[in-house]
Amino acid sequence: MTYAAYLANVTRLAVDVVNTADTADLSAATRQMLGEHEVAWPAPGELEPLRGLLREALAQVVTGGRAGAVGALLKRYPPDMHLSDHDQFLHIHFARDGLPPQRWIGQTTAAALAHVATGDPAVTLGRCAASGCERFFVDESRNRTRRFCSGACASRTSVAAYRAREKT
């Protein structure tokens, strides 16, 4: 796994935590990542203190504004950088395996978002352009111009625009 792929995976973890209101609905990729790092599954409500700070940090990264929330994440959840070869490839981890979920996710995502905020070109973060949708996404499209978090939001927006044109 390349370092850029690792940063993208961890950024997707941050997006998943922010976009998901209930820990039971976290993605299979998040389940796998937590399992690989011996992190217990978060209890309902356990990630709430972190979720708000992550949402603010993601919003600042998307808009390219000052990254005060990323700095606050780093201060509250200082990364513990170390080398790991758990998947037979030497790479950097930002938190020790087996930590409580909020701490492990906080340290890991704080470090990854610091990289993304400073312009790591391999990870592009976006916010859905659909009316009423506040979800974030990692844009891995070829030209990094994705506008919607899902096909459903893109379709809903297209249908609404079509209907608005038909009324005139």
Image (spheres, rainbow, N blue to C red):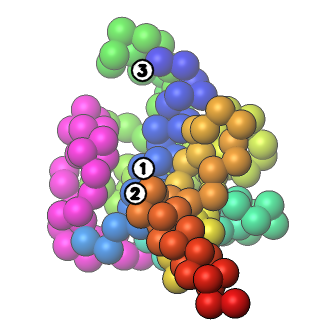
Q: Is residue 16 magenta?
A: no
| CA distance for labels 2 and 1 | 5 Å
What's the residue type where badge 3 is placed? Ser
Q: Which segment is the magenta one? A: 23-49
Give neighbour class at mark 1: few <14, some 14-19, many 20+ (Cα, 10 Å).
many
Q: Position of residue 145 (x, y in %)?
A: 70, 48
| CA distance for labels 2 and 3 | 24 Å
* Left or right of residue 51: residue 37: left
Residue on which disc 1 sits: 13
Residue 151 occupies quadrant = bottom left
Q: Closer to the observer: label 2 or label 3?
A: 2
> Does the image show residue 77?
no
Which of the pair 30/45 is nearer the observer? 30
Q: Residue at x 41, y 76 (%)?
A: 49
Q: Position of residue 89 (x, y in %)?
A: 43, 11
What's the residue type where badge 2 is placed? Asp
**Labelled disc at residue 31:** none
Q: Position of residue 107 (x, y in %)?
A: 48, 50
Q: Is residue 29 magenta?
A: yes
Residue on which disc 3 sits: 84
**Labelled disc at residue 16:** 2
Q: Are marks 2 and 1 in contact (CB under 8 Å)?
A: yes
Secondary element type, mark 2: helix
Residue furthest to the top in view is 88
| CA distance for labels 1 and 3 | 19 Å
What's the residue type where badge 1 is placed? Leu
